[in-house]
Image (cartoon, rainbow, N blue to C red):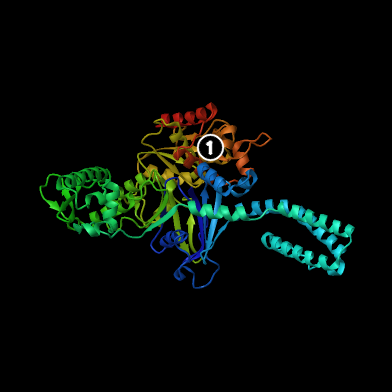
């Protein structure tokens, strides 16, 4: 099960965050200090099953509304099969209760509820089955009333299915008592018996919410564990007694990563040679793994024993002495703690939340932090907050979500280019308090200027899907519409960089293309169109079959219509569609594109390549 998106309402400074869609591996909440990044992570943390009631500090003092934390998940096929088997669901019940995408929300009392995407279909399913049967029962109850007349007990009225069944049982017990006193004739008794048998039979056909509650229980059982880290200050000890080692979290993390069997090593009957071999083996393993991430200097992490103590040390290549962990820099100590705690969670389907990682390490080491997170994200989902440019890969801007705070509270912006009035990345640069000229390289020597973020996602997705070497060493730079491209052209020309503007072949794109050629004396080499076909946009490069199958996830319309016109008529959110396509490719999902789609995109890549 994977988290797809979340929404937070009335939590601390957040009135309504809006929906935040997660990236395929790492999601980065970027924003200024006090923008609400920590509050967002804390709210997701409080969704955890381990937290039964939301803390009072989380509930806004102004009582702006009820606190609600919504998380939406993707249910994988194996989990679905397991739940169907455990809950003994019929095919129809599984269809109503277990869609591939579903949401749960938690209120301030710590109660969980399905969102309407599951509740409504199942209620409709229950009502469709029960309503005609309830009418039959009601009709039979009225006939019983006519039969018994003044001796009829109070007829049960439907409130909920479980209570109604209990009321019917009580009703029939009372009838049995009264008919015995009435001494009905044979014909009346026969009619009464048939009516009761009919009601009982129909009663058995009524659907209850038993399956609904069983599914809720199972879904809550398999929701990924949410782990929140706000600091990494537990330093690996230099020396620790055997009897304390197994209860020390940092030591246990070291053991998990290095494959060290603490129970075996701490066995007092183990001879010295065997203990030394076990410790040396684990030292070699963890040193090799740690070296892949800590690029500042070549170090070894060592564990040895001295009597009834374990000793942990750090060795530096080329130097004969060893160091206690606390003798290294504060930045190293922080990174080691960070590495041990997170790497110990590897392989678990967890959601890891990290608030402002890397505050204590320098810029180069922050890139090592990102490398650790990227490695771990193969096994778990990671969400972290930052205002550091060194934790943002300029080739993976799809990971970034802006957190902004105004009079209406903290909100999350998925479209990282919304409201940009200058160069493409102004909102991100503004949110993290930097200047585009200051060590945050989002453009390069060779730049491909695109109309919007959807072009950026579609082209990045296709580049990865085709697996070639097209557009190597070139930067895809999305703007916020064709009219913003001239501003970027002006800046890039001023910096003496190379560029190609790629425009839609629609009236707006053609107008901007002519303006570029006229104002900046550009030729056809610098101004390209996605296709030579009139009125075509980036989405029209997909064949119709591929577009509806892999982009919109909807059946093809019966009338002939271009992909771009379909998006416009249906008022679909093109950035979201393109982002989902990119993330599906990035996750390695099976996407078998037609020759038409491959040819169209390959042709565009070749034309861009030749322009440089």
- Left or right, residue 193 beside residue 313: right
Q: Nearer the viewer, residue 488 or 156?
A: 156
Q: Describe the element under mark 1 as helix, strand or loop.
A: helix
The quadrant of the rendering that contains the C terminus is top left
Q: In x, y percent, where is residue 134?
A: 76, 56
> Is 322 on the left or on the right of 74, as rendered?
left
Q: Is residue 511 visible?
A: yes
Q: Position of residue 29 (x, y in %)?
A: 42, 55
Q: Position of residue 500 (x, y in %)?
A: 43, 37
Please identify the residue farthest to the left as the structure is shown: 320
Q: Does residue 507 appear left or right of residue 493 in this picture?
A: right
Front in this rendered view, residue 17 or 600: 17
* Disc 1 crowd, CA 10 A, few/some/many (<14, 14-19, 20+): many
**Residue situated furthest bottom in the rendering:** 61
Q: How many marks?
A: 1
Q: Residue at x 64, y 56 (%)?
A: 209
Q: Residue at left 82%, top 57%?
A: 193
Q: Residue at x 37, y 34 (%)?
A: 472
Give percent across and percent down for residue 427: 44, 54
Give the answer, above or below, for where 280 lies relative to 49: above
Q: Is residue 506 toward the left or the right of residue 20 in the image? A: right
Residue designated by label 1:
538
Q: Is residue 437 visible?
A: no
Q: Nearer the viewer, residue 76 or 457?
A: 76
């Amino acid at each position: 099960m994977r988290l797809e998106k979340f929404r937070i309402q009335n939590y601390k400074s957040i009135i309504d965050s809006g929906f935040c869609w997660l990236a395929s591996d790492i999601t980065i909440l970027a924003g200024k200090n006090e923008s609400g990044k920590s509050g967002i992570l804390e709210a997701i943390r409080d969704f955890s099953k381990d937290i039964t009631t939301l803390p009072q500090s989380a509930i806004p003092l102004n009582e702006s509304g009820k606190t609600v934390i919504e998380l939406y998940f993707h249910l994988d096929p194996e989990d679905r099969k397991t739940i169907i088997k455990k809950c003994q669901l019929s095919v129809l019940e599984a269809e109503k209760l277990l869609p591939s995408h579903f949401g749960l929300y938690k209120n301030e009392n710590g109660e969980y509820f399905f969102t309407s995407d599951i509740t409504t279909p199942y209620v409709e399913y229950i009502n469709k089955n029960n309503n005609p049967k309830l009418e039959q029962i009601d009709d039979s109850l009225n006939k019983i009333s006519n039969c018994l007349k003044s001796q009829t007990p109070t007829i049960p009225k439907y409130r909920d299915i479980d209570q109604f069944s209990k009321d019917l049982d009580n009703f029939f017990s009372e009838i049995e008592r009264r008919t015995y006193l009435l001494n009905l004739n044979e014909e009346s008794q026969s009619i009464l018996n048939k009516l009761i048998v009919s009601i009982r039979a129909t009663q058995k056909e009524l659907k209850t919410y038993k399956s609904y509650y069983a599914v809720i229980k199972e879904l809550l059982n398999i929701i990924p564990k949410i782990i929140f880290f706000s600091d990494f200050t537990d330093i690996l000890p230099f020396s620790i007694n055997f009897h304390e080692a197994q209860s020390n979290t940092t030591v246990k993390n070291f053991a998990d990563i290095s494959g060290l069997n603490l129970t075996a090593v701490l066995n007092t009957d183990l001879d010295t040679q065997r203990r030394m071999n076990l410790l040396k083996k684990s030292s070699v393993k963890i040193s090799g793994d740690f070296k892949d991430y800590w690029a500042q200097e070549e170090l070894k992490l060592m564990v040895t024993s001295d009597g009834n103590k374990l000793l942990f040390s750090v060795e530096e290549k080329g130097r004969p002495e060893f160091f206690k962990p606390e003798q290294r820099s504060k930045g190293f100590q922080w990174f080691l703690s960070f590495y041990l705690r997170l790497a110990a969670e590897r392989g678990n389907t967890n959601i890891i939340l990290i608030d402002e990682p890397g505050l204590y390490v320098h810029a180069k080491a922050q890139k090592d932090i990102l490398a650790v997170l990227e490695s771990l994200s193969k096994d778990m989902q990671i969400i972290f907050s930052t205002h550091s440019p060194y934790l943002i890969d300029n080739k993976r801007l799809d990971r970034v979500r802006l957190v902004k705070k105004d009079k209406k509270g903290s909100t999350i912006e998925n479209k990282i280019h919304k409201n940009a009035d200058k160069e493409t990345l102004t909102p991100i640069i503004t949110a993290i308090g930097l200047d585009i000229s200051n060590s945050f390289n989002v453009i390069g020597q060779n730049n491909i200027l695109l109309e919007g973020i959807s072009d950026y996602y579609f082209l990045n997705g296709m580049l990865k899907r085709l697996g070639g070497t097209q557009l190597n060493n070139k930067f895809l730079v999305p703007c916020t519409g064709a009219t913003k491209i001239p501003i970027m052209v002006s800046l890039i020309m001023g910096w003496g960089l190379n560029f190609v503007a790629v425009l839609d072949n629609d009236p707006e794109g053609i107008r901007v293309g002519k303006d570029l050629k006229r104002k900046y004396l550009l030729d056809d080499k610098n101004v390209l169109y996605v296709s030579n076909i009139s009125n075509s946009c980036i989405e029209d490069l997909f064949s119709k079959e591929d577009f509806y199958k892999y982009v919109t996830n909807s059946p093809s319309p019966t009338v002939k219509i271009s992909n771009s016109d379909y998006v416009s008529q249906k008022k679909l959110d093109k950035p979201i569609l393109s982002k989902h396509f990119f993330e599906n490719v990035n996750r390695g999902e099976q996407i078998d594109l037609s020759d038409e789609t491959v040819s169209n995109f390959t042709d565009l890549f070749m034309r861009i390549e030749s322009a440089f």
